[in-house]
Image (cartoon, grey):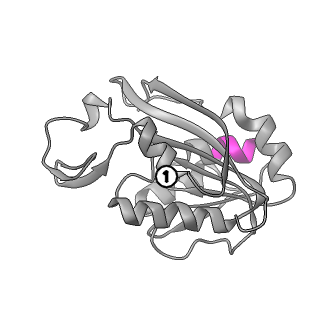
């Protein structure tokens, strides 16, 4: 696995928008992004389902509060208490209705005006499962025994249709996993309007 410095360009915005509130990182893996966030002076609360990944992340980012838990468990931060949420390639394991519910939980966890920075598998991600695998539902496949979701632009519009203001969205490729991986990178703000 190679280094992937995708967060660097967003650090000034994260520092400004998170202010003195913690950043929640969903699915921190071995701590690449966790280390970037803590080095930027942010208060990071992170989690991952893998005990091995959590141990590695704790070594890489000792200043962060890192837990081992499932994404479906209650988040380490309560409603309205996160200045930002970072979720890099960690929201793609679930059926569509469960994915919508997960994004709604993220929305509730953010303060009004808080940021969500996420990367999502693209339907063009040919090297990592977007084609040639048994379909569970549209854009959701069983890839080597693991359910895995892929997103197109219309999916992102539906996923973030309510209560979000889109700051940026790009279709990109990373070589973090050696072969080129297609993904969406999107930055959104929790709308501060009533009822959002």
Which residue is painted at 28% across and 45% down in the image? 139
Is residue 50 in sight in this rendering?
A: no
Magenta stretch: dominant secondary structure: helix
Res 75 → quadrant: bottom right
Quadrant holding the N terminus:
top left
Estimate the x, y position of residue 52 in percent, counting from the top left: 41, 58
Can residue 39 be found in the magenta stretch? yes
Above or below residue 78? Residue 42 is above
Q: Nearer the viewer, residue 155 or 127?
A: 155
Which residue is disc 1 drawn over? 159
Estimate the x, y position of residue 40 in percent, counting from the top left: 77, 41
Res 83 → quadrant: bottom right
Can residue 31 be found in the magenta stretch? no
Estimate the x, y position of residue 181 in percent, counting from the top left: 37, 28
Q: Nearer the viewer, residue 151 or 22?
A: 151
Q: Secondary structure at mark 1?
A: helix
Tell me which segment is drawn in magenta: 35-40
Quadrant holding the C terminus:
bottom right
Above or below residue 76? Residue 16 is above
Estimate the x, y position of residue 145 in percent, counting from the top left: 17, 54
Which residue is painted at 48% across and 67% down in the image? 101
Which residue is painted at 65% across and 52% down in the image? 164
Q: Is residue 36 left or right of residue 102?
A: right
Above or below residue 63? Residue 98 is below
Q: Nearer the viewer, residue 46 or 115?
A: 115
């Amino acid at each position: 696995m190679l280094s992937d410095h995708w967060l660097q360009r967003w650090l000034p915005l994260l520092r400004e928008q998170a202010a003195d509130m913690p950043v929640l990182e969903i699915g921190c893996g071995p701590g690449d992004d966790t280390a970037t966030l803590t080095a930027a002076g942010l208060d990071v609360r992170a989690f991952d389902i893998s005990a091995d990944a959590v141990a590695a992340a704790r070594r890489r980012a000792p200043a962060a509060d890192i837990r081992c838990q499932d994404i479906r468990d209650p988040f380490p931060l309560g409603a309205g208490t996160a200045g930002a949420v970072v979720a890099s390639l960690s929201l793609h394991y679930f059926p569509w209705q469960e994915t919508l519910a997960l994004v709604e939980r993220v929305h509730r966890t953010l303060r009004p005006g808080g940021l969500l920075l996420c990367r999502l598998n693209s339907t063009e991600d040919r090297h990592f499962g977007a084609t040639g695998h048994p379909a569970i539902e549209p854009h959701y496949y069983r890839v080597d025994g693991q359910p895995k979701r892929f997103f197109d632009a219309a999916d992102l519009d539906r996923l973030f249709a309510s209560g979000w203001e889109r700051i940026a969205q790009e279709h990109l490729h990373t070589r973090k996993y050696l072969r080129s991986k297609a993904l969406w990178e999107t930055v959104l703000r929790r709308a501060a309007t009533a009822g959002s």
